[in-house]
Image (spheres, grey):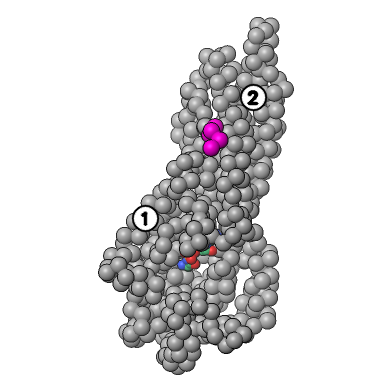
Amino acid sequence: MPPLSATLFVPMNKRFYITTAIDYVNGQPHLGHAYEKIVADVIARSRRSLGQETFFLTGLDEHGQKVQQAAQAEGKSPQAYCDELAADWKAFAKKLELTNDDFVRTTDPRHKEFVQAILAKLHTAGHFYKASYTGFYSTKEETFLTEKDRRPDGTFDPSYGEVVELLEDNYYFKLKAHQQWLIDYLEKNPSFVQPDHRRNEVLGFLKNNELEDLCLSRPAARLNWGIPLPFDPNFVTYVWFDALVNYISIPAAHGDPILDLGSGVSVPGNGAQRAQPQTPDAKSQTRLWPADIHVVGKDIVKFHAVFWPIMLKAMGLPLPKQILVHGWWQKDGAKISKSTGNIVDPVAVIDEWGLDAFRFYVLRELDIGPDGNWTDAGFKSRYQAELANGLGNLVNRSLSMLKRYRNGVVPAKHDELAAAAAKAADETRALLKQNQLQATLQSIWGLVTRANQYVDQTKPFNLAKDPARAQRLDEVLYNLTETCRVLAVLLWSFLPGTAVKIYAQLGLTGAPDKLDAATWGGLPAGHKIGEPAPLFPRKEER
Ligand code: MSP
């Protein structure tokens, strides 16, 4: 059989697989980390809601010099130090109500063993070589500096800390050889890196620079908090060959047959592609790879769009379908920084305003791509206008009126707002398939605004005073109550807690977690709703 093009081979029953960057364990989670994870969570939820089996992976990057040093400074072993912090990061994922299916830690034995196995295979297949290097090394940044890093006076920026001249043997991955292949791949696959301007940046970089081979090791004498190279115990694996591999080590641990190192990943020699194994009981297997989306920040595009595809090619594995690159948050127009105190503490915001207010603000304020700017005034203004006065007010007055005027019993079906609801539902479906989260929220709020206008125009509180208009009041109340139900379904991926509350207030059980349920007319006449309660309490100005 001729080799299949690995990049085209995707099994039928593969799950939608989405990942985030894995965060460095040192330090506490901040707005940027929270944003990325929420973006991935909304995409994961929306795919499930569209009926796709989905797997969402997030986690922690735990090796490296900074962790080793921080642990030492606290008199702890690096593992104990990581274990403590990992508990905080996992609690943070819960706080954000992430629906991740697994949480990877790069110190997990399942990850370390996979990294070693893949390194051994790549080494045997001739993708690595050992070489000496002399250069200026910043201990603080754990990196060799180049001539480009020098200031005009020849010194290095004090932010690099102590810079020492170092002669070092290391292992290198033959990256250079695949440069033209990657350029061709990016040219042929415009959706591989999104948004477009990020793809253009990567292409520009590749066309104007010669790739350097990638150093994949550090001498264990200098850094021992890392995964030992299986073929040379004097070295540990350096950051990217450890961190990026999480995207495949965890699917492998879940039994993805494409990553079965026993029979599956047969690393070819330089440049070759390989055929994928087919097994008869394919239905029962967790098929995840290739990832559908890697969500990452703009600072790590090169690692994901240049190093990673070449690493995968060397492994003979298909490439992820998309690297989805988000921008960076600032606060009040300045860099988020712990040292200057310019931070947004997501936990404090969530404790004060609720998780859904936080999720709403970051998703509504910032599209996936550009940089964003957090301001407390902007946050409060969206809370007040769009959540409290918009969605909250609509749901509360609609259900309260049904309660007051009809004892909470849903009248006969009526279709005055059906077209507006169908438009929002159709747009939501289409936009979510394109990961256009901000645009989806704009569309959903179109329906919120339309329904609030409908209350103002039809004035049910006046209709209720006139017994001759009882029929009209029934119609209006049906339209409003059913719109609330549709909104709960459309909002599920974004504001899951709010969606569930709306459902409960409507007296419906379960979660509004399938977009098919957004079809108009789901509320049957005679159904009795539950108790209305404010979704977004108005806050006193302080
Ligand atoms: N450990 C690496 C990633 C390895 S992925 C195989 C790393 N970690 S990080 O903790 O520094 O960053 C994690 C993610 O958070 C990155 O995608 C990064 O872009 C994102 N952000 C960090 N600060 C951010 C903002 N201020 N705003 C938005 N996202 C930001 O890089």
Dot 1 beta carbon under 8 Å from ligand 1: no
Give the residues drawn in magenta, as a range: 538-542
| Residue mark closest to the camera, 1 vs 2 | 1
Where residue 438 sits in the image (x, y, percent)? 63, 48
Q: Is residue 455 above or below residue 445?
A: above
Q: Nearer the viewer, residue 178 or 445?
A: 445
Residue at 44%, 82% in the rendered image: 162
Q: Residues within 10 Å of mark 1 (few under 14, many from 20)?
A: some
* Most common secondary structure along the magenta stretch: loop
- Dividing the picture into quadrants, the one containing residue 379 is top right
Q: Is residue 541 magenta?
A: yes
Q: Nearer the viewer, residue 345 or 286?
A: 345
Point out the tag, 1 or 2, that comes first from the N-terminus. Answer: 1
Residue at 67%, 13% in the rendered image: 463
Q: Is residue 23 above or below residue 204?
A: above
The kind of secondary structure element at disc 2 is helix
Residue 261 lies left or right of residue 455; in this view the side is: left
Where residue 231 sits in the image (x, y, percent)? 35, 85
Q: Is residue 178 magenta?
A: no
Residue at 61%, 81% in the rendered image: 179
Tell me if residue 166 can be seen: yes
Q: CA distance from mark 1 to mark 2?
A: 45 Å
Residue type beneath disc 1: Asp
The residue tagged 2 is 479
